Amino acid sequence: MFKNLLILPRKGEIDNSGNLWVNDFMDKELFKKLQAGRKRYQTKRTKERVRWEKKLFKEGFGEIKKLNKRELFLCGVMLYWAEGFKHKDESGLGLATSDPRMAKFYLKWLEKCLGIGKDQLILKVTANESHQYRIDRIESFWSKELKVSKSNFRKPFYQKTKWKKNYKNKNEYYGVIRIRVRRSLDMLRKMRGWLEGIAVAKEV
């Protein structure tokens, strides 16, 4: 008699997964009305969620406002702690990211806080080998985004890892940009001190 061999809820009931189960006793028109009501409810909840997300985003954005030089400096050090090259065998400052805005912030931090200009940078793209045919376009993307001459770029590195995930638009893939600072070993040594200073700093 039932359309499903599982034990069904009573007429018009919704199971634990949120799916409306229908058995032979339910009127089709009633089912359509219930489905329509459910869709209206979901639409309402989605709109409420979007409004709430926008409200929180606006509040968070407003709480940052402007960064003074010390705040900018500390933000940059924390960024380096997260994404910078810190291995004991490193010979200078370096950072890798796939986020253009993060890379722009890092370059601004280098200039504003450390006095390091773009002419002191060495850039290298890391990309999957399946995008080797696009490498000129990828390097041009980073050169334009960061406003750094392509003459500052070194030979790219290709990863041989096979992707398990299929990307819908492969033309939006720009790999990872690796940004190094020339002759910056002493600055890296100082960076290690900044990082330790933050790690053990006492609250005021």
Image: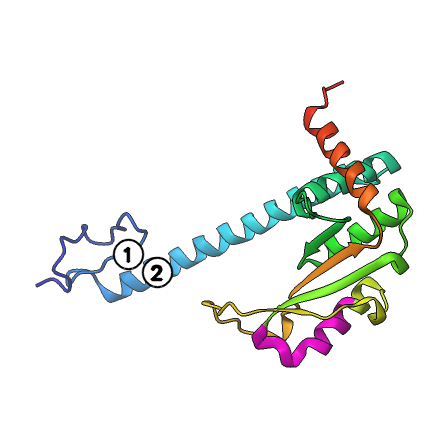
Instruction: Please name the amino acid that badge 1 sits on.
Output: Leu
Q: Residue furthest front?
A: 89
Q: Closest to the observer: 189 or 97?
A: 189
Hey, what amino acid is under mark 2?
A: Gln
Q: Give the residue number, with chain letter if any, for mark 1.
A: 20
Q: Is residue 31 magenta?
A: no
Q: Quadrant of residue 39?
A: bottom left
- Crowding near pointer 2: few (<14 within 10 Å), some, many (20+)? some
Residue 145: % across, % down: 79, 65
Residue 137 is a magenta residue: yes
Residue depicted at x 30% and y 51%: 17
Question: Is residue 100 visible in the rendered structure shown here?
Answer: no
Judge depth for marks 2 and 1 and give the one in front. 1
- In this view, the residue in front, 82 or 8, is 82
Q: Which numbered disc flags the more N-terminal residue, 2 or 1? A: 1
Magenta stretch bounds:
129-142
User: Spatial distance from mark 2 to mark 1, Cα to Cα?
Assistant: 8 Å
- Taking depth in this image into account, of 69 and 116 the one nearest to the observer is 116
Q: Which mark is residue 35?
A: 2
- Counting from the top left corner in percent of width and height, residue 177 is at 71, 61
